[in-house]
Image: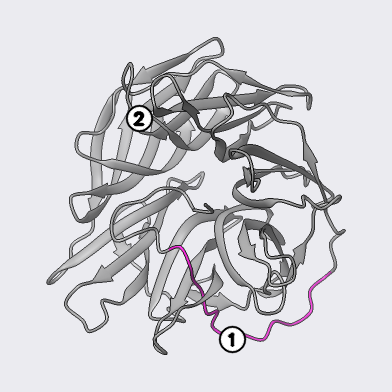
Amino acid sequence: MMASRSGPAPTRLTAILIALAIVLSVAPAHAAATWTRVASPNRGTVASALQDVVMVPGTSTAWAVGYSYDSNLAAYRTMTQRSTNGGAWSIVSSVNASATGYSQLNRVDATSTSNVWAIGSLVERYDGSNWAAMSSPAGVALRGLDVVSPTEVWVAGYSGSAATVTQWKNGTWTTRYTQTSTGRHLTVFEAIAVDASGQVWAVGWDRDYNAPGRPVSSLVVHFDGTSWTREGTPNPANRNTLNDVALANGEVFAVGVAQDTSGGGITPRSLMLHKQGTSWSSLTVPQGEPGSQDQLLSVAAVSSTSVWSVGYYNSPSSGLYEPLLVHWTGNGGAGTLATSSISPALTVSALASGVSATSAGNLEAVGYTAPPSAGNATLILKGTGG
């Protein structure tokens, strides 16, 4: 079954997006990226999946995190994988939330090879030798992660029915922001990003249970170093959710899914929002192919003129779910969006749930495949020329 990262009720709103039409002018061309699948290990035969990836800054090391199914325990367990010097990927022993129960990891970030953090069912940290469990913010379901330094980490998620941002500073967790609402709302942050000056953006969604049809609005909150503000963002459909956010030299990109249910059915399309200056706009994301239903799960910036987002779409031509690889190129607000393909094609259903990029244009994306007669298997894609 193809699914996005797990989420709270009502769902992660997996089906989605009518993009608000904005005509984009032609921008300077970037070299087209080449995406290929690289070998990645699996644990067991029932299910192995990767949910996020980070390329460690200034190094040739990359980490990916996710989960695998342990048939002996009848439970999903955390899984971390590492590639060093651009070489083969291997599984590295990781920590679980309990000795026998369910555990998974959905986000990873790092500032160095000895300061790698992952969150999901728990918080854990790799110190260059081993993964170790860390304290977690009390009562917070963890969804987004940004590692600033060895002494500062930000997470975003929700507590009860309210989206929440929490900061770990010198060993102590402190709640920095909780979304307030009038009436019955469920708000969730799915991702968070912090820039070098200490400004913070958290993104997610806001479901209004008071309004007819219980619409879902995109949710973006910004901390400017002094105060927190919810920013006005486009909502091209009646259900909109943001899954990830990336910063690029003063510009902000947020991606997700939007779902139009006004006709009684579901019309899903990818959603990409772009902030330049003081305002947000919704970009027209090309479909994976004509008639497909698409969603974006992760975004990473090479620079302010090159941004990649990944997710998946259902292919009317092949009958499979296919990874969706979207490249935005722009300059001074102008931009173009185009999809890329994997060579050779995968020939099985698959999704890409996480992407990471370097300023040199090196790319890694992760996810999983879903063969019709076998268990889910890890998927790692390598991109060059981005």
Question: Picture coordinates of residue 219 (x, y %)?
Answer: 36, 65
Mark found first going from the N terminus, 2 or 1: 1
Mark 2 and mark 1: Cα distance apart in space? 42 Å
Location of residue 80 with respect to 17 vertically, above or below: above
Question: Picture coordinates of residue 119 (x, y %)?
Answer: 41, 33
| Residue density around tag 1, few if under 14, some if 14–19, many if 20 or more, within 10 Å | few
Residue farthest along the top direction in this orientation: 129
Residue 23 belongs to magenta span: yes
State the residue position of label 1.
21
Question: Mark 2 belongs to which amino acid?
Answer: Tyr
Secondary structure under badge 2? Answer: loop
Q: Is residue 254 visible?
A: yes
The image quarter containing residue 54 is top right
Question: Mark 1 belongs to which amino acid?
Answer: Ala
The image quarter containing residue 112 is top right
Point 23% across, 58% down: residue: 179
State the residue position of label 2.
102
| Residue density around tag 2, few if under 14, some if 14–19, many if 20 or more, within 10 Å | some
Q: What is the magenta range?
A: 14-28
Residue 67 belongs to magenta span: no
Q: Which is closer to the viewer, label 2 or label 1? A: 2
Give the prevailing secondary structure in the magenta stretch. loop
Numbered circles on residues, count: 2
The image quarter containing residue 285 is bottom right
